[in-house]
Every structure is written in C-alpha cells, then in structure tokens.
Amino acid sequence: MRDAGSTRTTLDFDDDLLAAVKEFATQRNQSADKAISHLLRIALSQAHPVETCNGIRLIPRTVNAPITTMAEVNRLMEEP
C-alpha cells in the first residue's frame, strides 16, 4: 500500500546507483522507494546559492582546487 500523497512513476537509474540505493535502504530497514525519497529530500533541501559576475554564472571553487590563470586558459584554447 502506498502512502497518501505519493505518486507512482517509473525511473531509470544507472546500475551502480540503484545498487547503492538498495544497500542504503537495507541498512536502514527501508524500501528502496522510501530511501530514494529520503535522499532526494536531503539533496533538494540544501541551499545551492548561484553566484554571478557580469551576468555569467560562476562555478563554485572546490577546496584546494588550483586557481586557473589566463595563461592556462590560453594554453588550453591552443590545444587541438
């Protein structure tokens, strides 16, 4: 029996992702659909601020990522 307010749908997941969800669900004594709902709620509830500069969306820099210089950009543009 489905919970009130739930919708049945068909989704295609990569095999490794589905295996990870099933393992996650098993560890928590949940069904895979409950685990997916739980994980989606967590992922979608986290704030993902979007920063822009002169109308261009900036990609957040990860910790310890090297700073890209114009010399590096020019070098990459010259590659075939």
Image (cartoon, rainbow, N blue to C red):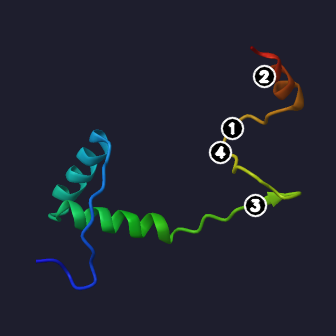
Q: Quadrant of residue 27?
A: bottom left
Query: What is the spatial separation of the Cα atoms under label 2 and label 4, in whole angstroms?
Result: 23 Å
Can you say whether 48 is above or below 5 in the image?
above
Residue corresponding to mark 2: 76
Q: In terms of sequence position, does the residue under pointer 2 or pointer 1 come before the other?
A: 1
SS label for mark 1: loop
| Residue positioned most to the top | 80
Could you say where residue 49 lies in the image, as x and y percent from the top left?
A: 67, 65
Asked whether 14 or 75 is in front, the reply is 14
| Residue at the spot of label 1 | 65
Which residue is nearer to you in this view: 2 or 71?
A: 2
Whole-percent x and y of residue 11? 30, 55
Is label 2 in a helix, a strand or a loop?
helix
Q: Looking at the picture, which amino acid does disc 1 mark?
A: Ala
Which numbered disc, 2 or 4, marks the residue that appears first in the sequence?
Answer: 4
Q: Amino acid at mark 2?
A: Leu
Q: How far separated are the C-alphas under marks 2 and 1?
A: 17 Å
Please determine whether, in this image, residue 75 is positioned above or below residue 4: above
